[in-house]
């Protein structure tokens, strides 16, 4: 995949620049941000705002059933600039909002379609009962959030190839927990998150999307200059939906994604985050597999 090759080369170049030994006073950002939002606050920060650019392309499609995957002639290229912000409401509590703007270029044997529109708004709150590294007990945080249907759902698409469809069309309420601990330079992190979607109507029929689950594991290493190198593995799944009270088999999906990322403090209050990611075959069902890269920049206040 040409996009993946370019992304990998770009990522290596960025890492070579940011990983040069130097003095830095800012702390590396927490690992949990890689699974939920690029902007969790570190212990000494009060607020942040930032922007992210995410580039991705599909390279295969998982079938509805079976463990294998197959190549298709359809391709999606996505360009997703996003804005995010986080604020500390209590000494151990913070709230974060994330809004994407998605440009999707969909190619098929029948033609090409490109559309740009806002996706679903995500708001997540986090409360740290125990912070990682402050005692022998691992850091424990509770996560509660919602996803607002500000994007365009499947029944609202206006293009022949549905390139403007980028939302689930209903509210989602989610919750979960994360556990994190540090051992010198080493950071270990696990997050579990589940989401419940409210019932809605699609083309006059009652629809209820299945439960969503996300499992994230991460291993990170913080260098002496506060640069963090991190690897993550994320598994996501959606259960089958129901239509007019009847089960709709084959409407759920599963995917597993591996990522490598670098987080570096450019100054005391400016943080850079870069990543490369790809779905892992054959650990997927009923969805396109994609790979790509992202870069984000966050300004913080103490």
Image (spheres, grey):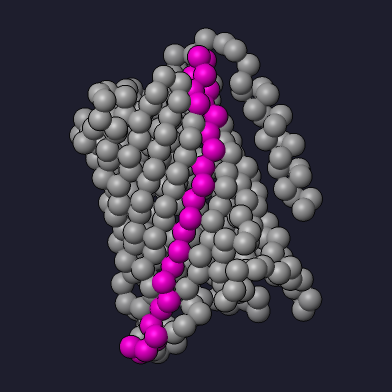
Measuring from the top left, give residue 251's x and y in whole percent: 49, 78
Q: Is residue 278 above or below residue 241?
A: above
Which residue does the image show at 26% across and 45% down from the upper left? Answer: 142
Q: Is residue 153 above or below residue 39?
A: below
Task: Assign the magenta stretch its main secondary structure.
Answer: strand
Which quarter shows the C terminus?
A: top left
Measuring from the top left, give residue 151's x and y in whole percent: 47, 65
Is 240 one of the magenta-colored residues? yes
Q: Is residue 73 above or below residue 233?
A: below
Q: Nearer the viewer, residue 74 or 157?
A: 74
Residue furthest to the front in view is 67
How many marks can you see?
A: 0
Residue furthest to the top in view is 23
Start-end of magenta stretch: 221-247
Examine the rendering and report whether any part of residue 56 can be seen.
no
Measuring from the top left, give residue 143's x and y in whole percent: 29, 47
Examine the rendering and report whether any part of residue 246 can be seen.
yes
Q: Is residue 219 left or right of residue 205?
A: right
Which residue does the image show at 26% across and 25% down from the upper left? Answer: 136
Q: Nearer the viewer, residue 76 or 164?
A: 76
Q: Nearer the viewer, residue 66 or 234?
A: 66
Which residue does the image show at 45% across and 64% down from the upper left? Answer: 237
Which residue does the image show at 48% across and 55% down from the upper left? Answer: 235
Is 22 one of the magenta-colored residues? no
Measuring from the top left, give residue 75's x and y in whole percent: 71, 65
Res 290 → quadrant: bottom right
Res 65 → quadrant: bottom right
């Amino acid at each position: 995949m040409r996009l993946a090759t370019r992304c990998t080369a770009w990522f290596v170049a960025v890492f070579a620049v940011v990983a040069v030994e130097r003095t830095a006073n800012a702390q590396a950002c927490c690992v949990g941000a890689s699974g939920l939002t690029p902007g969790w606050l570190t212990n000494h920060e009060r607020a942040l705002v930032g922007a992210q650019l995410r580039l991705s392309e599909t390279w295969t499609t998982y079938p509805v059933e079976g463990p294998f995957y197959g190549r298709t002639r359809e391709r999606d290229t996505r360009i997703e600039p996003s804005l995010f912000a986080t604020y500390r409401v209590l000494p151990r509590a913070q709230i974060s909002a994330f809004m994407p703007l998605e440009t999707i270029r969909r190619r098929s044997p029948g033609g090409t379609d490109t559309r740009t529109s806002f996706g679903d708004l995500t708001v997540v709150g986090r409360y740290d009962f125990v912070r990682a590294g402050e005692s022998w007990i691992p850091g424990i945080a509770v996560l509660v959030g919602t996803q607002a249907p500000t994007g365009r759902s499947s029944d609202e698409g206006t293009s022949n190839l549905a390139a403007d469809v980028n939302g689930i069309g209903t509210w989602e309420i989610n919750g979960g927990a994360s556990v994190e601990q540090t051992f010198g330079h080493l950071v270990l992190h696990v997050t579990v998150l589940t989401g419940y979607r409210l019932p809605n109507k699609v083309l006059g029929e009652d629809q209820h999307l299945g439960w969503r689950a996300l499992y994230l594991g991460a291993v990170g290493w913080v260098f002496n200059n506060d640069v963090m190198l991190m690897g993550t593995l994320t598994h996501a799944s959606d259960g089958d939906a129901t239509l007019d009270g009847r089960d709709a088999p084959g409407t759920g999906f599963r995917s597993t994604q591996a990522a490598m990322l670098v987080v570096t403090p450019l100054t005391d209050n400016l943080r850079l985050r870069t990543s490369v990611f790809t779905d892992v075959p054959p650990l997927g069902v009923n969805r396109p597999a994609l790979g790509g890269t992202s870069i984000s920049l966050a300004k913080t206040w103490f």
